[in-house]
Image: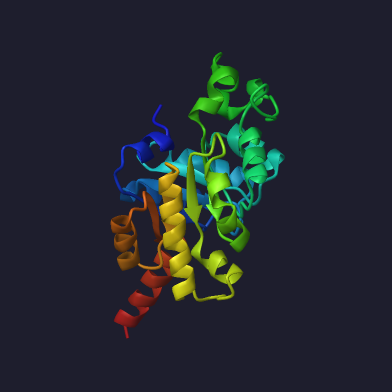
Amino acid sequence: MMRFKDRLAEGKPLRGLWQSLATPYTAEICARAGFEWLLFDGEHAPNTLPLLLAQLQAVTPFGAMPIARTPNDEPAIIKQYLDIGFTTLLVPMVESAAQAARIVAATRFPPHGIRGVASATSRASGFGADPTYLATAHENVTVILQIESRAGLEALDEIAATPGVDALFIGPADLAASLGHLGNPRHDEVQAAITNTLMRARAAGKPVGIFALSPDDAKARFIQGFSFVSLGTDIGLLTTGACALLAQSA
């Protein structure tokens, strides 16, 4: 089983796309396009567990690695995302090592963590068909923590050093807001914070991802040293394409 952390360890640029339309149709279209990973957003998109499951099933036959962003760090929600079959989770707004440790614990069964056990009814275990699932499930989980606030920046070194944290991800929009530059992620202070975060995380041996602001920004981020970059969103593709088509017909 190829894990996302294995893909990160290969050191090749991994191009992704945010999935916010909450439909398996568009998820399958994007998976067929050839992106290395797709992010299914449970924080800012109208995604329910059944919708997330349908999208996960739609993209499974293709090469895109599915990542799910949870709405928060609640253990019950993390458990549900893992139970339906996601093995890579992006948890937003992480601001301390203690919080990072709680998140990691929520992805592990006892004695390594606090994840609730429901293997016989869990899609992730093949509905009980995998007899090794309880003992090995944590080995296949990739935990990515999102740094997107001043508090997160201050605690970055401790968060990165937390056992079980596999990668970090920078959210420029919330980071800009936290630094006093709402709606302006290109501000010099925000960009300096992004560069500083990348350097500190890489020094700690953690790969770092980011949401690019444009295709040119994505290229620059890979050159800068980011391991995985979101090139945009499914909503953005549809909006841009629709507007361009209309303009061309005028």
Across and down, in percent, residue 187 comes to 46, 75
Quadrant in the picture for the C terminus:
bottom left
Towards the viewer: 208 or 121:
208
Query: Residue extending furthest top?
Result: 131
Q: Is residue 29 left or right of residue 172?
A: left
Percent from the top left, x then y, of residue 56? Answer: 50, 41
Q: Is residue 249 above or below residue 42?
A: below
Front position in the image: 47 or 90: 90
Between 97 and 176, the one lying in front of the other is 97
Residue 48 screen position, x and y as percent: 63, 49
Residue 225 falls left or right of residue 82? left
The structure's colour scheme is rainbow
Is the residue 70 above or below the residue 153 in the image?
Answer: above
Asked if residue 90 lies left or right of residue 232, the reply is right
Does 93 sit above or below residue 207? below
| Residue 32 at x, y percent in the picture | 34, 47
Total label count? 0
Q: Is residue 90 visible?
A: no
* Residue at the (43%, 70%) spot, across then down: 239
Residue 78, picture quadrant: top right
